[in-house]
Amino acid sequence: MITYLVAFLVALMVALVLTLVVRNRALAWGLLDQANSSRKVHVRPIPRLGGIGIVGGFFAPLCALFLVDSGVGQHFRYHTELVWGLFAGGLGIAALGLYDDLRGAGAKLKFSVQLLLALGLYWLGFRIELIANPFGPPVPLGLLSLPFTVLWVVGVINALNLIDGLDGLAGGVAFFGVGTNFILALSRGDVLLCLVMAALAGAILGFLVFNFNPASIFMGDTGSMFLGFVLAAVSIKTSAKSGTAVAMLVPVMALGLPIMDTLLAMVRRTVLGRPMFSADREHIHHRMMSRMVLSHRGAVLVLYALCALFTLTALGLHWANTAQSAMLLTGMAVVVAVLMRKLGYLDLRNAGDMGAARRKNIRLRSLVKDVTDAVRAGNGMKELWDAVRPLAGALDASRLELRLERQREGNRDGLTFETHRPAGSALPLEVALEVKNGDELLGRLMIAWSDGRSEINRDEELALELVADAVGDRAAKLLARADADPQRVVALRR
């Protein structure tokens, strides 16, 4: 136990110091998560590279084992598959997350790297070979072991990424998963997995000192994907060494909240015709704040309590017999059903509107694709406006405005495009979105409705954000060309 305590304390201290340094450097360098999106909960820019502290804190005590001549160190070095899986895979997923936090990585790149890392884990022996059956003998997977393993690893990575929506939530959820795996490993006397989980627990707590509401730094994709990867890998090892019939149910239950939230998001977006990888504010934590009228911190604490219940159920499944396992699963299913009904996920009163919403969203997705494709093909500011202008009619807006501005040689040049339509006479609802390239503000895209609506539709708002992002990216490239080639004229004067 002293070894585990030392690993925990070393990881805690390294994560504390490293997170503090990263936070201060991110503030100095302007590496901030801007509060400029409809899906953001925070209201001010926050540093987003806190995952570096988690990664550094986790690896610090493990790297020390290579330098210390001890029985534990020799045992650790002997298990090369575990070392390679955690070090190579962990650093790989952290590098992907860091690139995404700094530059932005598309869904294809993310899933390609995640898939390669999952295949690497399988090759190293991290395999799911049995599916738990609490009502009978476990079911061997055979050739399906590979796709199930890959699905688990990629799924858990993205589940932790999706749940990272409130201060301290993803870190707290991961901590409960770490605690479950630590207790199970300790009960079997598995020194290495206990050591790994102790290090990860210390790293998480060191980061949470700065991340609990009100947060002064976010973990970003660097932290959330890294936590998901390590938990996915360790959970496979934990279940593989378990002799119970419910082996794989234990890690599923331990990570019940992020898995449940991910499944709900997939079903919701499929039914409503939304892009599978689009962002929204319909996650469990969002609904808990809006429907249960909880504060930011209150919602996180309630979700911590739910994670604790999942943890107790997971541990109970590990030691329960068949009848007891069935009772535990039934009880947990009742709790989940009550929560889902409370949050409105099981409300069928609006089921008739889902078909219309799906058709509308499919048309909206087609519109956004056509507009963004035209924006990216534009070779001048007038062509950008010609690409964006169809939004006014398609969204039944009364006014659409694109304003581009540029600070140059002490002067501010500006160019404004505007169109009006006869679309109602009520007091207009105006929505303005920033047109940016990274952190550089290039202008604004403004749209107004005069049909009496009091708020913007979430899907339309997300569509406008995608268009604004495309305009910002293309405008920045056109301006860069103009600066590089004096013969190319890109006027920004009205």
Image (cartoon, grey):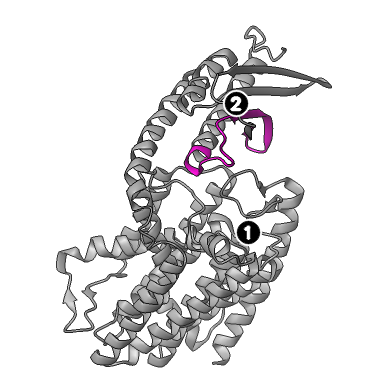
Instruction: Name the element at disc 1.
Output: loop
**Does residue 82 show up?**
no
Closer to the N terminus: mark 2 or mark 1? 1
Instruction: Name the element at disc 2.
Output: loop
Density class for disc 2 (Cα within 10 Å; few <14, some 14-19, many ≥20) is few
Q: x, y (%) of residue 236? A: 34, 73
Can you say whether 116 is above or below 64 in the image? above
**Does residue 424 show up?**
yes
Please indicate whether residue 125 sits to the left or right of residue 287 in the image: left
* Inter-mark Cα distance, 2 to 1: 44 Å
Q: What residue is shown with label 1?
A: 218
**For residue 346, what is the image quadrant?**
bottom left
Front residue of this view, candidates 206 and 452? 452
Residue 119 falls inside the magenta stretch: no
Density class for disc 1 (Cα within 10 Å; few <14, some 14-19, many ≥20) is many
Q: Residue at x 49, y 27 (%)?
A: 396
Q: x, y (%) of residue 378? A: 51, 17
- Camera-nearest label, 2 or 1: 2
Q: What residue is shown with label 2?
A: 425
Q: Specify start and end residues of the magenta stretch as a single range.
A: 433-461
